[in-house]
Image (cartoon, helix red, strand yellow):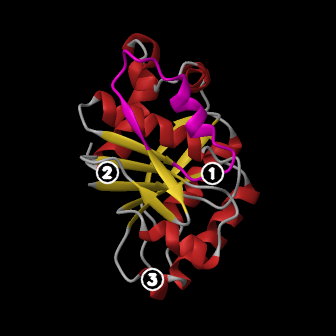
Amino acid sequence: MHSIVILNPKGGCGKSTLSVNLAGYFAQSGKKTALADCDPQQSSSDWLALRPEDLPAIGRAEFSGGKIKVPGGTEVLVIDTPAAVHGQRLAGFVKLGHSLVIPMLPSPIDIRAAEHFIAELYSLKHLINRRVRLASVANRVREDTLAAASLEVYLEKIKLPTGQKLPYITVLRASQNYIRAAEKGMSIFEFAPAKTTYDREQWHPLLRWLGG
């Protein structure tokens, strides 16, 4: 089973949007997929409740006491995490995943918060005790803006505490398609391709990185 954790302690960076669209992608690709909603806001759970019965099923992985109960036979588990997680709680979420995706917004505040988060993440390596694949995604980007350009430049240059470059995978634009899909319990991969071609193309680098 491949566990994918969507994690950033900064609220409002689009963790739930990434989570539900990844779950929808893997489900429609024929993988037995489950979604764990660990956020008290329960946005991903609300999305699951809206999901049409004629679409590929996505299992609900129950989260309680820091542990996730995964439906049997699950091939891909997507974990939507809450904001403001630090210390041992942060390490606990990282332990649950094989791949860690960090969504970042194009603002100086969010960029600085991401720097602090990555530094904290590496300070907890002694609590994690295993290698986790790590990558960043620029999310909700308004294209052709100075903020978007600044974020791309930053993500291209940011270094991990080890001195290695943080893998920067792709830019996902701010698109009404995500809102329309969420209202129906769908992912953009389950909309008519003609309506979502450009958005899907932006996902290709991330999906390749995840092995999708």
Foreground residue, 161 or 154? 161
Q: Is residue 185 left or right of residue 211?
A: right
Q: Nearer the viewer, mark 1 or mark 3?
A: 1
Label 1: few (<14), some or many (≥20) within 10 Å?
A: some
Q: Which residues are magenta?
A: 37-60
Whole-angstrom CA distance, mark 2 to mark 3, is 21 Å
Q: Quadrant of residue 49?
A: top right
The label number, if any, that marks residue 209 in the structure image: 2
Q: Where's the N terminus, which quadrant? A: bottom left
Q: Position of residue 12 (x, y in %)?
A: 70, 47
Which of pointers 2 and 3 lies earlier in the amino acid sequence? 3
View extreme (bottom): residue:
126
Q: SS of the residue at dot 2?
A: helix
The label number, if any, that marks residue 102 in the structure image: none
Tally the numbered discs. Answer: 3
Q: Nearer the viewer, mark 1 or mark 2?
A: 1
Which of pointers 1 and 2 lies earlier in the amino acid sequence? 1
Q: Nearer the viewer, mark 2 or mark 3?
A: 2
Whole-angstrom CA distance, mark 1 to mark 3, is 30 Å
Q: SS of the residue at dot 3?
A: loop
Q: Which residue is mark 3?
A: 162
Which of pointers 1 and 3 lies earlier in the amino acid sequence? 1
